[in-house]
Amino acid sequence: MKAKVVSNKEVSPGLFRLSLAGGERLTTGRPGQFVMVRGVWGADPLLSRPFSVYRYRSSIDVDGTIQLLIKRVGRGTELFSRVVPGEELTVQGPLGNGFPKIDVSGRLFLAGGGIGVAPMMSVAESLAGEELKRTRLIFGGKAVNDVSGIDEDISDVGVETIFVTEDGGRGRAGTVVDVLKDELTPSDVVFACGPREMLRAVATLAGEKDCRAFISHEERMACGVGLCLGCAVPKASGEYALTCTDGPVFVAQSILWEEL
């Protein structure tokens, strides 16, 4: 489908919040799903780029609008950082399987490492009442710039947030996993997205704490619909799963992390 750029704002150095209006279908996804997006820039780059949906319910007064959080790291994201309101992009999705809707007797921890905070916000904004009160967003990074730019959205959603940076520049000094080590109890549930080593540590910690944990696995992919087989991940069962169609959300312990 074609989606029109509503706004594209650099919310912190190199981090952009891109709002796209594409009709009701675009906003009927679940937290944790993703979209494949490309512009009309010819063959460079050739492939669409996958992005988790950051927000389905934005404050922008345009029907059928979603928001993406894009970090400028390469050729594709550099081009997305330059798109302007009114420009049209091609969007597939929402795709894949998002985070499950589950009963949580304890607390729900949304662990976002850097740009991995994007799908966590879509989870948070789907909650209300007691569910939201029992939810904590842990937003971590190496330095203050890694955990900046989304304060307005955190306030809008109303989720209690724990900031953590490795250099102590904002919030607690340490890592997302350090916070979880201190906070998790067996009745809690963790949803996580971030660097692979962080997700591996979350899976290990959840096993040690006897908690349920689900991770959103980010992987390069060409098609997003299970055709290219470029996003296969090894599972503890000995089989392989596709990030695009079986994921991107998996039970954390179902992944064979030693071979990923």
Image: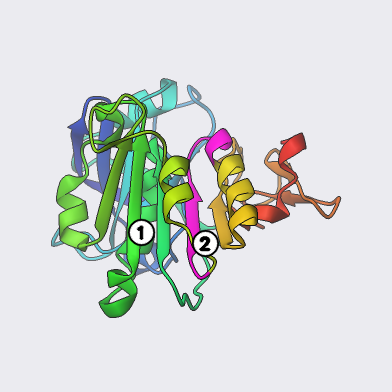
Chain part drawn in magenta: 187-198
Q: Secondary structure at mark 2?
A: loop
- Residue 60 tag number: none
Please report the residue visible at 22 percent of the width from the left and 65 percent of the height from the top.
63
| Residue 121 seen by the camera | no
Considering every residue shown, the one lying at the far front of the view is 182
Give the quarter of the figure containing the N terminus. Answer: bottom left
- Front in this rendered view, residue 157 or 243: 157
Residue 94 pos. (x, y %)? 47, 58
Visible residue check, residue 233: yes
**Residue 200 percent location from the top left of the image:** 61, 41
Instruction: State the colouring used for the structure image.
Output: rainbow
Marks 2 and 1 close (CB-CB < 8 Å): yes
Relative depth, front residue between 26 and 143 = 143
Q: Around disc 2, counting alpha carbons within 10 Å, would you say few (fewer than 14), some (14 to 19), or many (20 or more)?
A: many
Name which residue lies at 49% across and 63% down.
Answer: 185
The disc labelled 1 sits on which kind of residue?
Ser
Magenta stretch encompasses residue 197: yes
Left or right of residue 246: residue 176: left
Mark before the other along the chain sequence, 2 or 1? 2
Q: Disc number at residue 98? A: 2
Badge 1: residue crowd in 10 Å (few <14, some 14–19, many ≥20): many
Secondary element under disc 1, as helix, strand or loop, is helix
Residue of label 1? 122
